[in-house]
Protein backbone atom coordinates (compact mmCIF):
# COMPACT_ATOMS: atom_id res chain seq x y z
CA UNK A 1 0.00 0.00 0.00
CA UNK A 2 2.87 2.39 0.73
CA UNK A 3 4.14 2.04 -2.83
CA UNK A 4 0.65 2.74 -4.12
CA UNK A 5 0.29 5.72 -1.78
CA UNK A 6 3.51 7.32 -2.98
CA UNK A 7 2.32 7.08 -6.56
CA UNK A 8 -1.08 8.63 -5.91
CA UNK A 9 -1.60 12.35 -6.44
CA UNK A 10 -4.79 13.58 -4.77
CA UNK A 11 -6.09 16.80 -6.39
CA UNK A 12 -7.51 19.45 -4.05
CA UNK A 13 -11.10 18.69 -3.14
CA UNK A 14 -10.73 14.98 -3.88
CA UNK A 15 -10.33 11.90 -1.67
CA UNK A 16 -9.09 8.34 -1.99
CA UNK A 17 -10.38 5.40 0.00
CA UNK A 18 -8.48 2.26 0.99
CA UNK A 19 -10.52 -0.70 2.19
CA UNK A 20 -9.26 -3.46 4.52
CA UNK A 21 -6.44 -1.35 5.94
CA UNK A 22 -4.91 -2.81 9.09
CA UNK A 23 -4.15 -0.65 12.12
CA UNK A 24 -0.44 -1.16 11.55
CA UNK A 25 -0.80 -0.01 7.95
CA UNK A 26 -2.72 3.03 9.15
CA UNK A 27 0.03 3.90 11.63
CA UNK A 28 2.71 3.41 8.99
CA UNK A 29 0.86 5.61 6.49
CA UNK A 30 0.54 8.39 9.10
CA UNK A 31 4.30 8.24 9.63
CA UNK A 32 4.96 8.25 5.89
CA UNK A 33 2.65 11.20 5.28
CA UNK A 34 4.24 13.14 8.14
CA UNK A 35 2.78 16.04 10.10
CA UNK A 36 3.55 18.84 7.65
CA UNK A 37 0.97 18.15 4.98
CA UNK A 38 -2.30 19.52 3.70
CA UNK A 39 -4.17 16.21 3.48
CA UNK A 40 -6.59 14.98 6.15
CA UNK A 41 -6.95 11.36 7.21
CA UNK A 42 -9.86 9.37 8.69
CA UNK A 43 -9.80 5.71 9.72
CA UNK A 44 -12.85 3.66 10.65
CA UNK A 45 -12.50 -0.09 11.26
CA UNK A 46 -10.25 -0.80 8.28
CA UNK A 47 -11.54 1.93 5.97
CA UNK A 48 -8.95 4.64 5.37
CA UNK A 49 -9.84 7.95 3.70
CA UNK A 50 -7.28 10.56 2.62
CA UNK A 51 -8.62 13.94 1.49
CA UNK A 52 -6.90 17.04 0.17
CA UNK A 53 -8.92 20.20 0.89
CA UNK A 54 -9.60 23.07 -1.48
CA UNK A 55 -8.25 26.58 -0.72
CA UNK A 56 -11.83 27.71 0.05
CA UNK A 57 -12.07 24.92 2.62
CA UNK A 58 -8.91 26.14 4.35
CA UNK A 59 -10.09 29.75 4.33
CA UNK A 60 -13.44 28.86 5.91
CA UNK A 61 -11.71 26.70 8.50
CA UNK A 62 -9.33 29.46 9.46
CA UNK A 63 -11.95 32.20 9.72
CA UNK A 64 -14.44 30.09 11.70
CA UNK A 65 -11.62 29.13 14.07
CA UNK A 66 -10.89 32.83 14.60
CA UNK A 67 -14.55 33.35 15.49
CA UNK A 68 -14.34 30.52 18.03
CA UNK A 69 -11.23 32.03 19.59
CA UNK A 70 -12.97 35.40 19.93
CA UNK A 71 -15.93 33.70 21.58
CA UNK A 72 -13.67 31.86 24.01
CA UNK A 73 -11.85 35.07 24.88
CA UNK A 74 -15.02 37.09 25.40
CA UNK A 75 -16.61 34.33 27.50
CA UNK A 76 -13.32 34.25 29.43
CA UNK A 77 -12.91 30.52 28.85
CA UNK A 78 -9.37 29.20 28.92
CA UNK A 79 -8.66 26.96 25.94
CA UNK A 80 -5.95 24.94 24.24
CA UNK A 81 -6.11 24.82 20.41
CA UNK A 82 -4.81 21.68 18.72
CA UNK A 83 -5.67 22.26 15.07
CA UNK A 84 -5.69 19.12 12.93
CA UNK A 85 -4.05 16.85 15.48
CA UNK A 86 -4.52 13.14 14.75
CA UNK A 87 -6.81 11.56 17.33
CA UNK A 88 -6.86 7.77 17.27
CA UNK A 89 -7.59 4.77 19.42
CA UNK A 90 -6.51 1.27 18.48
CA UNK A 91 -9.04 -0.43 20.76
CA UNK A 92 -11.90 1.12 18.74
CA UNK A 93 -10.12 0.98 15.40
CA UNK A 94 -10.79 4.65 14.73
CA UNK A 95 -8.81 7.78 13.93
CA UNK A 96 -9.65 11.29 12.74
CA UNK A 97 -8.00 14.62 11.98
CA UNK A 98 -10.47 17.49 12.51
CA UNK A 99 -10.12 20.69 10.57
CA UNK A 100 -9.65 22.35 13.94
CA UNK A 101 -10.35 21.51 17.56
CA UNK A 102 -10.26 23.03 21.02
CA UNK A 103 -9.89 21.79 24.56
CA UNK A 104 -11.99 23.97 26.84
CA UNK A 105 -13.37 22.17 29.90
CA UNK A 106 -10.45 19.77 29.73
CA UNK A 107 -7.88 22.41 28.80
CA UNK A 108 -5.84 22.00 31.99
CA UNK A 109 -5.50 18.25 31.37
CA UNK A 110 -3.72 18.66 28.02
CA UNK A 111 -2.06 22.07 28.32
CA UNK A 112 1.52 21.89 27.09
CA UNK A 113 1.43 18.21 26.14
CA UNK A 114 3.45 17.26 23.05
CA UNK A 115 1.59 14.00 22.44
CA UNK A 116 -1.90 12.82 23.35
CA UNK A 117 -3.11 9.30 24.07
CA UNK A 118 -6.88 8.90 24.05
CA UNK A 119 -6.60 5.85 26.27
CA UNK A 120 -5.66 8.23 29.07
CA UNK A 121 -6.31 11.75 27.74
CA UNK A 122 -9.76 13.22 27.05
CA UNK A 123 -10.94 14.01 23.50
CA UNK A 124 -11.37 17.64 22.35
CA UNK A 125 -14.37 19.48 23.75
CA UNK A 126 -15.13 21.16 20.42
CA UNK A 127 -14.19 20.06 16.90
CA UNK A 128 -14.78 21.81 13.57
CA UNK A 129 -15.37 20.08 10.23
CA UNK A 130 -15.66 21.96 6.95
CA UNK A 131 -17.58 20.34 4.07
CA UNK A 132 -17.96 17.00 5.84
CA UNK A 133 -19.10 14.56 3.15
CA UNK A 134 -18.39 11.26 4.86
CA UNK A 135 -20.97 10.01 7.37
CA UNK A 136 -18.37 7.62 8.76
CA UNK A 137 -16.56 10.63 10.20
CA UNK A 138 -19.55 11.30 12.44
CA UNK A 139 -19.26 7.73 13.74
CA UNK A 140 -15.61 8.31 14.51
CA UNK A 141 -16.22 11.53 16.42
CA UNK A 142 -19.04 9.89 18.37
CA UNK A 143 -16.89 6.88 19.25
CA UNK A 144 -14.11 9.19 20.44
CA UNK A 145 -16.66 11.05 22.63
CA UNK A 146 -16.18 14.52 21.15
CA UNK A 147 -19.06 16.29 22.87
CA UNK A 148 -19.54 19.18 20.43
CA UNK A 149 -19.00 19.10 16.67
CA UNK A 150 -19.49 22.09 14.39
CA UNK A 151 -20.14 21.24 10.74
CA UNK A 152 -19.95 23.96 8.11
CA UNK A 153 -21.21 22.97 4.70
CA UNK A 154 -22.82 24.80 1.76
CA UNK A 155 -22.74 28.09 3.66
CA UNK A 156 -24.55 26.71 6.71
CA UNK A 157 -23.27 26.04 10.23
CA UNK A 158 -24.70 23.05 12.07
CA UNK A 159 -24.01 22.55 15.77
CA UNK A 160 -24.01 18.87 16.75
CA UNK A 161 -24.10 17.69 20.36
CA UNK A 162 -23.31 14.17 21.48
CA UNK A 163 -26.22 12.47 23.26
CA UNK A 164 -26.46 8.72 23.86
CA UNK A 165 -23.48 8.14 21.55
CA UNK A 166 -25.18 9.94 18.66
CA UNK A 167 -25.14 13.52 17.42
CA UNK A 168 -28.23 15.68 17.50
CA UNK A 169 -28.54 19.09 15.88
CA UNK A 170 -28.85 21.93 18.39
CA UNK A 171 -30.07 25.48 17.94
CA UNK A 172 -27.25 26.77 20.14
CA UNK A 173 -23.90 25.81 21.62
CA UNK A 174 -23.76 24.93 25.34
CA UNK A 175 -20.23 26.36 25.33
CA UNK A 176 -21.59 29.76 24.21
CA UNK A 177 -25.20 29.69 25.41
CA UNK A 178 -27.95 31.97 24.12
CA UNK A 179 -26.05 33.12 21.05
CA UNK A 180 -27.56 32.46 17.57
CA UNK A 181 -24.25 31.24 16.19
CA UNK A 182 -25.74 29.00 13.50
CA UNK A 183 -27.14 32.16 11.93
CA UNK A 184 -24.46 34.72 12.77
CA UNK A 185 -21.24 32.90 11.95
CA UNK A 186 -22.21 32.29 8.28
CA UNK A 187 -23.25 35.95 8.08
CA UNK A 188 -19.93 37.17 9.43
CA UNK A 189 -18.02 34.71 7.26
CA UNK A 190 -19.67 36.16 4.17
CA UNK A 191 -19.02 39.65 5.49
CA UNK A 192 -15.35 38.78 5.95
CA UNK A 193 -15.07 37.87 2.27
CA UNK A 194 -16.51 41.25 1.30
CA UNK A 195 -15.06 43.62 3.90
CA UNK A 196 -11.81 41.94 4.92
CA UNK A 197 -10.66 39.89 7.88
CA UNK A 198 -9.63 42.54 10.42
CA UNK A 199 -12.70 44.70 10.03
CA UNK A 200 -14.98 41.68 10.32
CA UNK A 201 -13.23 40.27 13.37
CA UNK A 202 -13.61 43.59 15.17
CA UNK A 203 -17.28 43.70 14.25
CA UNK A 204 -17.82 40.12 15.42
CA UNK A 205 -16.12 40.80 18.74
CA UNK A 206 -18.28 43.90 19.22
CA UNK A 207 -21.41 41.85 18.49
CA UNK A 208 -20.42 39.19 21.04
CA UNK A 209 -19.77 41.85 23.69
CA UNK A 210 -23.14 43.46 23.07
CA UNK A 211 -24.88 40.08 23.31
CA UNK A 212 -23.15 39.33 26.62
CA UNK A 213 -24.51 42.59 28.06
CA UNK A 214 -28.12 41.52 27.44
Image: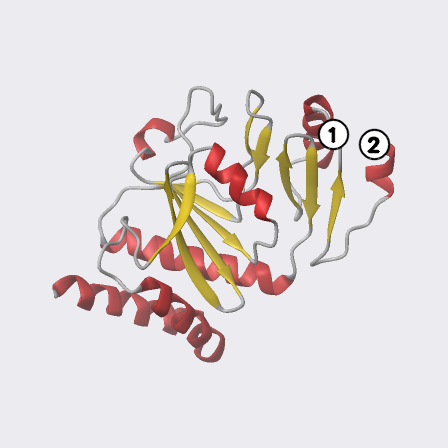
Give me the C-alpha separation between circle 1 and circle 2: 9 Å
For mark 1, give the secondary structure. Answer: loop
The answer to the question of whether label 1 and label 2 lie on touching residues, with beta carbons closer than 8 A, is: yes
Looking at the image, which residue sits at the far left? 214
Circle 2 packing at 10 Å, graded few (<14), some (14-19), many (20+), is: few
Residue at which label 1 appears: 21
Q: Which residue does the image show at 42% across and 59% down from the upper left?
A: 158
For the point 60% across and 65% down, the residue is 56
The C terminus - image quarter: bottom left
- Pinpoint residue 58: horizontal percent, then vertical percent: 57, 58
Left or right side of 164 for 74: left
- Residue 47 percent location from the top left of the image: 69, 36
Depicted 118 relative to depicted 207: above or below: above
Question: Could you say which is closer to the camera, residue 12 or residue 142?
Answer: 142
Residue bearing the label numbered 2: 1
The kind of secondary structure element at disc 2 is: loop
The relative height of residue 56 versus residue 1 in the rendered view (above or below) is: below
The first of marks 1 and 2 along the sequence is 2
x then y, percent, for residue 48 = 69, 37
For image coordinates 72% across by 55% down, the residue present is 14
Residue at 46%, 38% in the rendered image? 142
Between 161 and 12, the one lying in front of the other is: 161
Quarter the N terminus occupies: top right
Image vertical order of residue 149 relative to residue 12, above or below: above
128 or 62, nearer to the observer:
128
Establish if 149 lies above or below 185: above
Amino acid sequence: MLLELKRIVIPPGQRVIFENTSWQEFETILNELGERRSSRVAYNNGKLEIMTPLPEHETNKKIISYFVEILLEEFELEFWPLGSTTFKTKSMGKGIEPDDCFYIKNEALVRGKKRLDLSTDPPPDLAIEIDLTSTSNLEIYAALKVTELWRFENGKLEINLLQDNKYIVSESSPTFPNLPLSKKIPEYLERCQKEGRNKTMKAFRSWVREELKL
